[in-house]
Amino acid sequence: MTLLRSLLFLFSLILLTPPYSLIALLTFPLPVMLRYRVISFWSRIVLWLLRVLCNIRYEVRGREHIPATPTIILSKHQSAWETIAFQQIFPPQVWVMKRSLLLIPFLGWGLAMLRPIAINREAGRAALKQVTDQGRDRLKHGFWIVIFPEGTRVAPGKTGRYGIGGAWLATHTGTQVLPVAHNAGEFWGRNALHKLPGIITVSIGAPIDPAGLKPAELNEKVQAWIETEMSKIQASGVGHQASGEVGAGQASPE
C-alpha cells in the first residue's frame, strides 16, 4: 500500500506542478512579497497531499526560537521535503541554490520567480561575494535566507562537509543564524519513489549571534548543534510506523 500511495502522490504532483508553474509566471507583475505568497501556496498543497496520500506528517520543536526579524536558516539537508515544508514553517524566504536548478522545466520557473540566490559552486570567492551581496539585499527586503551547508542531500546517519557560505553571509551582514535539524530523509529519501508513513521531526535551535565570531568558528558552532540534535532525534526512536497509522494528536496540524 505504501508503494501505491507513493505512486498516487507522484501522479498528483505531475498534474499539479505544470499548471501551477504557469500561475507562478503570471505573478511577475505583482510585488515580490505578494508573489511569494501566491507561489508558496503550492507547498501547502503538496504537504496536504503527503498527509492524505502518504500519511506523512510533521512536528516542529523549538518554534519559540523563531525570531521576528529576517534571519539566516542553516539546516540539515536530507530530502526534497524540507525545501517544501520550510515555506510553511518559516516566514517568507529565499534559498541559496545551484544555478542549474533554475533550468528544470516548470519547477525551475517557479523557483526563478522567488528571487533565489542562484550560484555557480565552482566560482569560489566570486560565489561568496554573490551570496553576500544578494543576501544583504534579500534581508533588507524582509526575506529570510535558507542555506543547506552540506550543499547536497545527505543520507540519514551521515554527515557531509559543511560549507562556509552561510556562516560567511552571517558574519559579513551581522545577521543571526537559526540552526535546524530534521529527519525527513527517513521518510522521503534522496530520489526515492517510495515514501514511508510517519511523523517527521523538525528541531529548531536558539538563534546564534555571529558577533565576534569568524566564519569558520560560526560554522563549527552550527555544525555541532545540528549534528548533536540529529543524534538526539535518532536516539528518540522517531521513525516510520510500518502499519502506516500515525496518531494525529502526535503531529502538528500543518
Image (cartoon, rainbow, N blue to C red):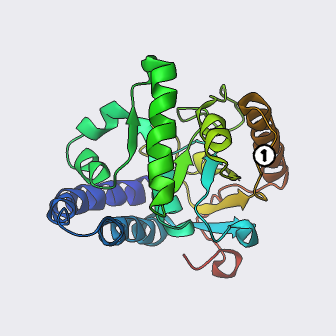
* Residue 107 x, y percent position in the rendering: 27, 49
User: Where, quadrant-wise, is the C terminus in this rendering?
Assistant: bottom right
User: Where, quadrant-wise, is the N terminus in this rendering?
Assistant: bottom left
Indicate left or right for 177 with 93 as reference.
right
Can you see residue 1? no
Q: 79 or 83: nearer the eye?
A: 83
Quadrant position of residue 215? top right
Q: 49 or 83: nearer the eye?
A: 83
Going 36% across and 71% down the picture, which residue do you hit?
Answer: 37
- The image shows residue 242, relative to residue 64, as above or below, that is above
Q: What's the residue type where badge 1 is placed? A: Ala
Quadrant position of residue 90? bottom right
Going 32% across and 54% down the picture, which residue do you hit?
Answer: 10
Can you see residue 225? yes
Going 80% across and 49% down the picture, which residue do you hit?
Answer: 229
Q: Which residue is mark 1?
A: 211
